[in-house]
Amino acid sequence: MATCKKCLVIGAASMALAVCCGAFGAHAIKSLLLEQVETGELTDIERLDISHSWDVAVRNHAVHSVSLILLGLAVAFCSPGYLRWARALLLAGIVLFSGLIYIYTGVKVTSGTELTPLMYLVPLGGTSWILGWILLAVGFYRHPAVISELD
């Protein structure tokens, strides 16, 4: 069975990073946020909002990391050009969506500085994921091995 080694390696490494980010959020970020609530720097609602944003970033990071691994295993069923673009867009989505939320949250929690303009780029990550999934669907549809099985 043919595989895309690059997808498998990037997906597995990205998944390891997602687990690390999850652990960091559950321990370090949580502790910092609780301290800030106790000192009055944050309200409890702000703490929950920040924590939720981090969790959403980790969850989406992990889902798309696993998706990259699955994409690496599905290479025999996808046209190569579509596969390359889908891989690039899924990875760009991880960086732009999850990565920017990590940076925004980390800076806000550690220094109190809000990098609000950075958050305007986050939707580009979601858009990258949507386009990546669309290209992947087209690539599966257009690949001869899949078309013959659908007919």
Image (cartoon, grey):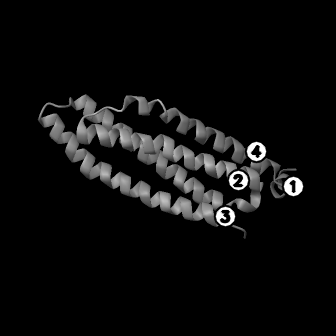
Q: 20 or 59, which lies in front?
A: 20
Q: Residue at x 17, y 37 (%)?
A: 36
Q: Residue at x 64, y 44 (%)?
A: 132
Residue 94 image point, x, y percent: 51, 47
Foreground: disc 2 or disc 1: 2
Q: Reading the chain from its start, which is encountered first: label 3 or label 2?
A: 3
Alpha carbon of mark 1 to alpha carbon of mark 4: how far?
15 Å
Q: Which disc number belongs to residue 148?
A: 1
Q: Find disc 4 in the rendering and name its residue.
A: 138
Kindly identify which residue carries mark 2: 83
**Residue indicated by mark 3:** 4
Residue positioned 54% across, 56% down in the render: 66
Q: Is residue 14 left or right of residue 147?
A: left
Query: 119 left or right of 105?
Result: right
Q: Position of residue 123 (x, y in %)?
A: 52, 33
Which element is circle 1 on?
helix
Extreme bottom residue here? 1
> Looking at the rendering, which quadrant does residue 50 occupy?
top left
Q: Earlier in the sequence, mark 4 or mark 2?
A: 2
Q: Quadrant of residue 119?
A: top left
Q: Are marks 3 and 2 in contact (CB under 8 Å)?
A: yes
Residue 117 at what x, y percent from top left?
42, 29
Front residue of 5/49: it is 5
With 52 as the anchor, is 34 left or right in this view? Answer: left
Give the CA distance from mark 3 to mark 2.
9 Å
Given contact means CB atoms under 8 Å apart, are the residues at marks 4 and 2 in contact? no
Instruction: Report, in whole angstroms, how far the alpha carbon at label 4 lies from the one at label 2.
Output: 10 Å
In this rendering, is residue 50 above or below 4?
Answer: above
